[in-house]
Image: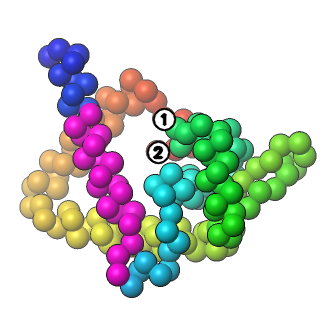
Amino acid sequence: MEIEEVIAKIRRIGSLVKNLSRRLDRPRGKQRGTHPDLTFSQARTIWLLDEVESHTMSELAALCSVSRPAATSNVDTLEKLGVIERFADPSDRRVVRIRLTEKGKKWHREHRRHHKQRMARLLQKLSPQERKELASSLEKMYNILSRIDPLPRNSS
């Protein structure tokens, strides 16, 4: 298969995954009041901070694939909402680290629960065999793509 064909297929799948992720990340109905209105990048920042104790601004920018000024803007907004906080690194007080607050951890738990429920409803549209095939295909795709461009250790 030609490289251009592979690129086109990756883009098509990427668009589908991106749209699905955004649909799943948007709270609906009554749930909207329990979650701040966040951009996709801000929500991703919270998800990344839940995976590890803390990150520096540069680490967050790299993991979110945004510029450092964009990461700083996200952090500023999230800090105003009270879901994250900045603190001095205990081993080097010149380094500023970012972590979730208790409010941020609660938001993430609720968001993850709602996300899982919405995903389950979508996947119920598939037969058990289709779900099995999808899971197998996604695992194969993950293994192949991670050989091309491995994820940093803290994100998956």
Side of 137 where 86 appears, left or right: right
For the point 54% across and 56% down, which residue is it?
42
Overall secondary structure of the magenta stretch? helix
Q: Could you tell me residue 120's position as x and y percent?
A: 26, 68
Query: Is residue 77 highlighted in magenta?
Result: no
Residue at the spot of label 2? 156
The residue lying furthest to the bottom in this view is 30
Report the side of 150 relative to 20 (left or right).
right
- Which residue is painted at 26% across and 32% down in the image? 10
Query: What residue is shown with label 1?
Result: 151
Q: Amino acid at mark 1?
A: Leu
Q: In which image quadrant can residue 127 be found?
A: bottom left
- Residue drawn at the location 33% of the way across and 37% of the way down: 142
Residue 67 place in picture, x, y as percent: 60, 37
The region drawn magenta spans 11-29
Judged from this view, the residue extending furthest toward the right is: 93
What x and y, as percent, mark residue 106? 58, 74
Disc 2 vs disc 1: Cβ atoms closer than 8 Å?
yes
* Magenta stretch holds residue 27: yes
Q: Quadrant of residue 26?
A: bottom left
